[in-house]
Image: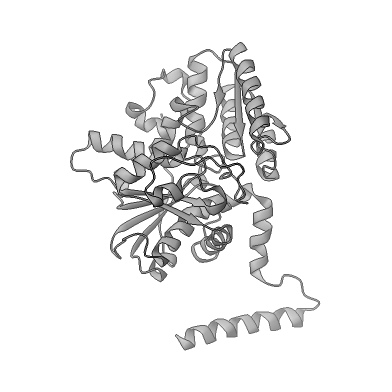
Amino acid sequence: MKGIWKYSQFLPQIAEKHRISLGEGNTPLIRSRYIGPALGLDNLYFKLENVNPTGSYKDRFAAVALADLLSRGATTCFATSSGNTGAALAAYSAAAGLRCFLVIVDGAPEGKMTQMRVYGADTLMVKGFGIDPEVSADVMRMLRQVAARHRSSVQISAYSESPTAMVGVQTIAYELAESLRPQHVFVPSGGGGLALSIVEGFRIWKSENTGFGLPAIHCVQPVGNNTIAGALEAGADAATEIAESTTRISGLQVPNILDGDAVIAGCRLSGGTGHLITDDAVYASQQELAANEGIYCEPAGAVALAGLKSALAASAVNVGSKETIVCLVTGHGFKDPASASRLANFGGRSYFESTKETFSYIESKLNDVKNKYDKN
């Protein structure tokens, strides 16, 4: 069977008749043509998880989640999401023939909401959910009660909540280990589930493959959601729960610890550390990926690159020019229309009063390019 089930020996043992795949996994690994050399790195790669079936790495999670639900005889999928998890579970629920109820974080991007609804999911955005701890706790308590009555469980992309499904995300590490053997991997983090998946995946691969060297796993977070990266960087052993996430980066607004403590231990053991970056640095990296590498991602998908650039500028990580570095690009740009509109503004003018004015503009732009290269 295709998809992540290629690695079935490392996945939960679920009968083949219950396995769901939409072709997730086996995502491209693209060597940087411009950003890497500009940073003095000969071997910078981007792992394009944004080209999974629903546009994010969460499809790996959903494939195992739905297979597990089918194997248990469930007829309904229940989940909470800020966007990508919901879109993935909605799609895989449709493929599995299960009804899907999604309680959505207050303020999730409309593009992701639309995607969930297209797949037929029932989406319920609760005021304050994911922002107000009391509201969030109340919603979770009631959702778990409903799921239990329907022989199901609540799917949340964290090991602390859905350890079985999270094993599917570990396949990212298997693909990297099999094809590239990187020395450093930079990973965006909200609650830490993705970073822990990479750590666990490489650990398992090493246990099965003598001579494989563990890469350093670096956890990157926006400063407005500093639950893990700051503690990791400071040498602390425990993540820090915050009252409210203030970052604007959708998908990484997770004020709870969730997998944070395990991420700190795993990253530190690998030789990696934590890196904090501003939202503006993320947006700049998002634009740079699109304009210089042709990679169109949502803001969260540019967090790893922003972390690498920040770490190099501050000499916070020792990366050799010949070492192999991977930045995970986690979600597609189409998922966040507001972000896409902002990026499009970098393109300059788009409307002209006459043909003459249009071509005068083109000539001026071409002269700008010529002058740039003449100087070099």
Please give left or right for residue 147 compared with residue 61 in the image. Answer: right
Please give left or right for residue 232 compared with residue 130 in the image. Answer: left
Q: Please state the horizontal and vertical placement of residue 241, each as a whole percent of the image.
A: 53, 40
Residue at 62 percent across and 16 percent down: it is 145
Q: How is the image coloured?
A: one colour
Quadrant in which the C terminus is drawn: bottom left
* Image quadrant assignment for residue 124: top right
Residue at 52 percent across and 19 percent down: it is 69
Note whether 128 is above or below 73 in the view shown.
below
Residue at 81 percent across and 77 percent down: it is 353
Q: Please state the horizontal and vertical placement of residue 253, each as a whole percent of the image.
A: 59, 44
Quadrant in which the N terminus is drawn: top left
* Image quadrant assignment for residue 313: bottom left
Do we see residue 172 in this rendering?
A: no
Note whether 75 is above or below 220 in the view shown.
above
Q: Residue lying farthest left?
A: 211
Please give left or right for residue 143 compared with residue 351 in the image. Answer: left
Number of on-image labels: 0
Q: Please state the horizontal and vertical placement of residue 216, each as a whole percent of the image.
A: 32, 49
Note whether 222 is above or below 69 in the view shown.
below
* Image quadrant assignment for residue 140: top right
From the viewer's side, name the closer residue of 210 and 350.
210
Do we see residue 82 in this rendering?
A: yes
Q: Residue lying farthest right?
A: 353
Note whether 132 is above or below 37 in the view shown.
above
From the viewer's side, name the closer residue of 228 and 32.
228
Q: Please state the horizontal and vertical placement of residue 268, each as a whole percent of the image.
A: 33, 45
From the viewer's side, name the closer residue of 285 and 161.
161
